[in-house]
Image (cartoon, rainbow, N blue to C red):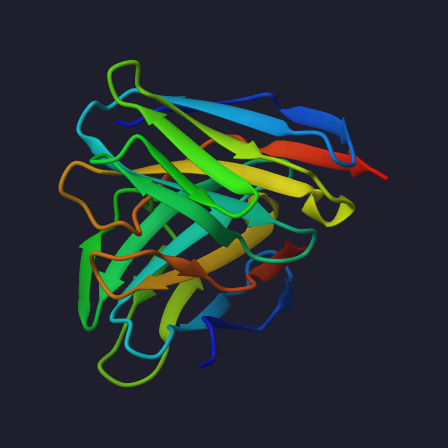
Amino acid sequence: NAGVMQNPRHLVRRRGQEARLRCSPMKGHSHVYWYRQLPEEGLKFMVYLQKENIIDESGMPKERFSAEFPKEGPSILRIQQVVRGDSAAYFCASSPGQGEAFFGQGTRLTVV
Amino acid sequence: GENVEQHPSTLSVQEGDSAVIKCTYSDSASNYFPWYKQELGKGPQLIIDIRSNVGEKKDQRIAVTLNKTAKHFSLHITETQPEDSAVYFCAVAGGGTSYGKLTFGQGTILTVHP
């Protein structure tokens, strides 16, 4: 039973480019959460999605960031026009709903 | 919103000693309290959790205690081993939300010396 799969593991983007981070939840899990971890800090909640629905986006920056979880395929976190401050590790977690959340290995985004 | 404070920020112990990490939270409606272990370059790994209807839970060398009145919970690791060295995060969820929407503490860097 594969765990939460994130790709790419490492992503380098120049300022102004777009970054796309993908997350495939564990089998049987229909709830996906995205977190951001800045260097030397804890994880901060960004967004909570179920299939085709955004449930809670209270932690998402108001501009440039968007997320989706389509009926088919992985969840996508999209960052448009990246800036140096977007450099961080982005983690995806999945759960079956009222159950424990399991995290992926993360995508480390570096903006140069 | 929820606020979680975690102490200490660093903890150094000798192999075989016990380690204790403490967290306090602010929202009395919170009802789920997991602990995660994060090794360098990896994602957080759930090691133990507790729900608000119990006061203590144990899994081999790891235990968690919860005091809802005081709004704090603690992680206890006994007979520590070098492979326990990692960053440990407490987290809090609840108040009607999914168990995946978590507020994390700032983390504790645990170092176990052989």
State the residue at coordinates (47%, 37%): B63
**Vertical relation: B76 (above or below) B46:** above
Q: Is residue A66 visible?
A: yes
Q: Is residue A38 left or right of residue A27?
A: right
State the residue at coordinates (34%, 79%): A27
User: As rendered, which of A93 and A109 lies closer to the eye?
Assistant: A93
**Vertical relation: B88 (above or below) B20:** below
x, y percent for residue A93: 40, 60
x, y percent for residue A107: 57, 63
User: As rendered, which of B3 and B47 lies closer to the eye?
Assistant: B47
**Vertical relation: B73 (above or below) A38:** above
Q: Residue at the bottom extreme?
A: A72
Q: How many circles with numbers are drawn on the protein? A: 0
User: As rendered, which of B70 and A46 lies closer to the eye?
Assistant: B70
Q: Quadrant of the C terminus of chain B?
A: top right
Q: Residue at the right extreme?
A: B114
State the residue at coordinates (61%, 47%): A84
State the residue at coordinates (25%, 66%): A96
